[in-house]
Image (spheres, grey):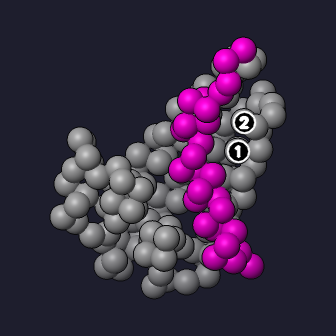
């Protein structure tokens, strides 16, 4: 069973994945093409989550510019919203599973493994309950 801690760690890895390239030290080896593609996929996934869960954008201080509307919105906690969250999680998992992870090395491979682990756990938990989405709960308790 996936614990809240596992989900939070996976969410943190997903949130930090797009900025890992910005943390590179001068003279560090350049990123692989697969790593750059993974960063782009992580950024796409994160952007979709920020749009669906405005509280997350606000809690991360990202409710500016294109996400400025997040300041005055709440996530959709209706049954339709829960179903949409579950579909989003399944879609994100499918995109990551289709990604060629064999080409990843080092931190990129670890980030991939951490995020896919969290998404698999969330998808499994989502399959057990009709009335709550793990993605939605992560946002409320973060």
Question: Dot 1: few (<14), some (14–19), or many (≥20) neighbours within 10 Å?
Answer: many
Depicted 91 relative to depicted 110: above or below: below
Decide: few, some or many residues near mark 2? Use Cα within 10 Å; few <14, some 14-19, many ≥20.
many
Quadrant position of residue 9: bottom right
Quadrant in the picture for the N terminus:
bottom right
Q: Is residue 28 above or below residue 104?
A: above
Q: Residue at x 54, y 50 (%)?
A: 15
Q: Which residue is denoted by mark 2 in the rendering? A: 108
Tell me the element at label 2. helix
Question: 29 above or below 70?
Answer: above
Q: Do the residues labelled 1 and 2 touch (CB within 8 Å)?
A: yes
Q: Where is residue 142 in the image (x, y as percent from the top left)?
A: 49, 70
Magenta residues? Answer: 1-27
Q: Does the magenta stretch include residue 54?
A: no
The count of marks equals 2
Query: Camera-side residue: 96 or 60?
Result: 60
Residue matched to label 1: 111
Please determine whether, in this image, residue 125 is positioned above or below residue 46: below
């Amino acid at each position: 069973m996936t614990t809240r801690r596992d989900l939070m760690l996976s969410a943190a890895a997903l949130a930090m994945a797009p900025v890992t390239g910005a943390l590179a030290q001068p003279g560090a080896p350049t990123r692989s093409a697969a790593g750059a593609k993974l960063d782009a996929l992580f950024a796409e996934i994160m952007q979709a989550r920020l749009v669906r869960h405005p509280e997350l954008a606000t809690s991360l201080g990202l409710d500016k510019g294109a996400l400025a509307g997040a300041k005055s919105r709440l996530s959709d906690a209706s049954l339709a919203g829960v179903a949409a969250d579950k579909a989003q999680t399944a879609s994100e998992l499918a995109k990551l599973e289709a990604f060629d992870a064999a080409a990843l090395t080092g931190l990129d491979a670890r980030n991939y493994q951490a995020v896919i682990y969290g998404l698999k756990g969330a998808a499994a938990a989502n399959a057990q309950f009709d009335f709550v989405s793990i993605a939605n709960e992560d946002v409320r308790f973060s």
